[in-house]
Image (cartoon, helix red, strand yellow):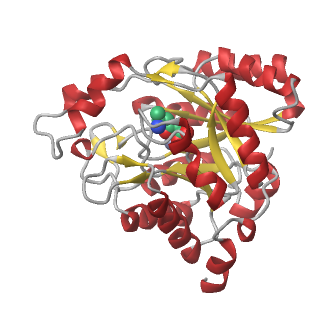
């Protein structure tokens, strides 16, 4: 059995600070949690940037640069930079960090959905920051837009930057979008897909749906032409990761997807969830991939070829 790549999605753009005091949002907090997640067993960290004063998702290029370069001076983890950005950001804003930073890996969202996180407002009694409730509420009427034109544009920009796309699949039809782009030669095998289950507006997080996504991908794209991972929003996170690794897939956890580590127990950092996944993998005799093993499994260019990598390697 292939080794297991664990990704930790450190902060994301879904949860707001009022939902957990442990959600990292300053660059230093994000860096600290990324380093901890790597030490716990994550070969990849997926990063977003947030305004250090308010925790609001940000497209500020300087914040991204600070986060990735500080992580890389402390450890050799693979860094996957978001192009999902924050809800409501423009196509250009979301893509900006890629062309200059040239990361090894970046998310590429493979279709449009009504990315609905407004039910989270019910969990907030007293918001910590003014932006939180309007941000969440706006998603009742928000299309997270990823049209074919956008996908082609992002794919080209990533190719030019030597960045491997991690294709986020929120629903089964998006596999068909990817197949269409492969047929056009816009995306080349082997591709890397992240099945994202449990977002309202996308496919629910059930075992049957994970199997459905995987089998659809095998039929549409061919088993040899893709590597896959899965993540699940909310309390389905850990049970579904156990299913994914049993199926031979890779797993993503982290506070972007779920703020808890057990029933009613907030995770103090993404590393808490990584440790749970490592424990399950140990019980199943599944070995954990190191960052370098993940690089070779995913065909990545190596950390020193990123826009910030050489300087970071010297500092490390
Ligand atoms: N910002 C969310 C709408 C990604 O990182 O590419 C989706 C997201 C995915 O976070
Ligand atoms: Zn993300």
Residue at left 54%, top 76%? 74
The reply to whether residue 247 is in sight is no
Name the image quarter holding the N terminus: top right
Q: Residue at x 61, y 50 (%)?
A: 6
Can you see residue 94?
Answer: yes
Left or right placement of residue 25 versus residue 184 in this view: left
Residue 50 higher or lower than 209, as above or below: below
Q: Residue at x 58, y 71 (%)?
A: 72
- Residue 304: x and y, percent? 73, 71
Between 45 and 68, the one lying in front of the other is 68
- Residue 217 shown left or right of residue 144 in the figure: right
Residue 144 vs 159, above or below: the answer is above
The image position of residue 205, as x and y in percent, is 51, 22
Residue 191 location, quadrant: top right
Q: Position of residue 277 (x, y in %)?
A: 54, 47
68 left or right of 306? left
User: Vertical placement of 263 versus 116: above or below?
Assistant: below
Look at the image and tell me in which quarter the C terminus lies: bottom right
Q: Residue furthest left?
A: 126
Percent across and percent down for residue 14 are 38, 37
Q: Residue at x 66, y 54 (%)?
A: 99
């Amino acid at each position: 059995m292939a080794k297991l790549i664990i990704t930790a999605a450190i902060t994301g753009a879904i949860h707001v600070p009022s939902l957990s005091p442990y959600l990292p949002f300053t660059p230093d907090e994000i860096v600290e949690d990324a380093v901890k997640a790597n030490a716990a067993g994550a070969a990849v960290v997926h990063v977003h940037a947030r305004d250090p004063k308010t925790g609001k998702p940000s497209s500020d290029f300087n914040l991204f640069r600070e986060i990735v370069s500080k992580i890389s001076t402390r450890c050799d983890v693979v860094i996957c930079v978001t192009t999902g950005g924050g809800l409501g950001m423009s196509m250009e804003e979301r893509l900006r960090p890629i062309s200059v930073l040239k990361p090894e890996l970046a998310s590429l969202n493979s279709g449009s959905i009504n990315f609905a996180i407004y039910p989270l407002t019910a969990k907030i009694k007293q918001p910590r920051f003014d932006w939180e409730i309007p941000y969440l509420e706006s998603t009742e009427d928000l299309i997270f837009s990823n049209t074919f034109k956008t996908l082609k544009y992002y794919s080209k920009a990533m190719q030019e930057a030597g960045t491997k796309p991690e294709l986020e699949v929120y629903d089964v039809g998006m596999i068909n979008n990817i197949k269409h782009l492969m047929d056009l030669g816009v995306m080349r095998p082997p591709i890397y897909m992240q099945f994202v289950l449990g977002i309202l507006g996308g496919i629910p997080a059930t075992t049957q749906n994970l199997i459905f996504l995987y089998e659809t991908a095998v039929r549409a794209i061919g088993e040899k032409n893709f590597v896959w991972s899965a993540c699940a929003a909310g309390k389905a996170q850990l049970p579904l990761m156990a299913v994914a690794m049993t199926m031979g897939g890779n797993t993503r956890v982290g506070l972007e997807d779920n703020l808890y580590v057990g029933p009613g127990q907030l995770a103090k950092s993404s590393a808490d969830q990584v440790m749970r996944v490592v424990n399950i993998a140990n019980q199943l005799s599944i070995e954990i991939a190191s960052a370098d093993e993940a690089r070779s499994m995913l065909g990545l260019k190596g950390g020193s070829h990123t826009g910030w990598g050489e300087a970071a390697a010297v500092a490390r």
